Image (cartoon, rainbow, N blue to C red):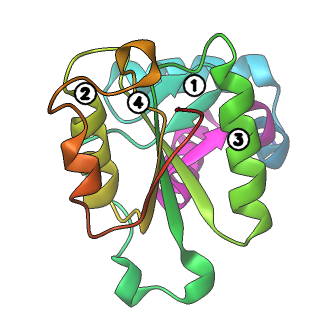
């Protein structure tokens, strides 16, 4: 059954709202549509600020409410937030591996991009936690892979579990 553009957009929004982030290829397959059509739909939704586009993925936009807090979800509904500087370079493989591990454990992975901007690691972590993340995987954009004086202290002060990924 072929869906009208508005119906496709609603279905994409419903699934992204429900899951937090999805790979475009998997979403296209699930909806029974071509990846090209889905990318076009995602671009239109992103232009309206309804979703955010990542390299090969679509995520729920920062600042908009999403799922209920962990206390109101069953254990299988855990969400792991991951902060990465980019999804380019080798980070695409890092995110893919994290997604496979997290989903293999029955949880869901959501992504926050820091884009190598100062203080954006902490801002993305706060966004992920505010939208229901139960723990964080943090691949900070610290210069030389180590925090400078005072940098990253916020991560050590979290009550939520934080795991540093691929850093000294």
Disc 3, disc 4: CB below 8 Å? Answer: no
Residue closer to the observer: 82 or 58: 82
Of tags 4 and 2, which is closer to the observer?
Answer: 4
Q: CA distance from mark 2 to mark 3?
A: 38 Å
Of tags 1 and 4, which is closer to the observer?
Answer: 4
- Mark 1 sits on what residue? 41
Q: Which residue is found at the position 34% from the left and 51% from the top? A: 128
Locate residue 159 relative to residue 13 in the image: left or right.
left
- Mark 2 sits on what residue? 120
* Mark 2 residue crowding within 10 angstroms, few (<14) / some (14–19) / many (20+): some
Residue 124 seen in the current view: yes
Disc 2, disc 3: CB below 8 Å? Answer: no
Q: Main secondary structure of the magenta part?
A: helix
Quadrant of the image occupied by residue 162: bottom left
Element carrying mark 2: helix
- Residue 30: image x %, image y %? 81, 48
Element carrying mark 4: loop
């Amino acid at each position: 059954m072929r869906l009208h553009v508005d119906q496709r957009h609603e279905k994409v929004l419903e699934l992204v709202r429900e899951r937090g982030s999805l790979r475009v290829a998997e979403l296209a397959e699930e909806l029974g549509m071509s990846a090209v059509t889905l990318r076009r739909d995602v671009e239109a939704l992103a232009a309206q600020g309804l979703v955010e586009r990542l390299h090969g993925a679509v995520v729920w936009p920062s600042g908009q409410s999403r799922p209920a807090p962990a206390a109101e979800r069953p254990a299988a509904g855990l969400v792991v937030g991951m902060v990465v500087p980019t999804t380019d370079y080798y980070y695409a493989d890092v995110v893919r591996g994290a997604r496979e591990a997290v989903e293999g454990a029955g949880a869901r992975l959501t992504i926050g991009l820091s884009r190598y901007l100062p203080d954006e690691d902490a801002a993305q972590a706060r966004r992920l936690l505010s939208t229901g993340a139960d723990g964080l995987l943090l691949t900070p954009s610290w210069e030389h892979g180590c925090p400078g004086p005072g940098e990253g202290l916020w991560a050590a002060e979290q009550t939520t579990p934080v795991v540093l990924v691929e850093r000294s």
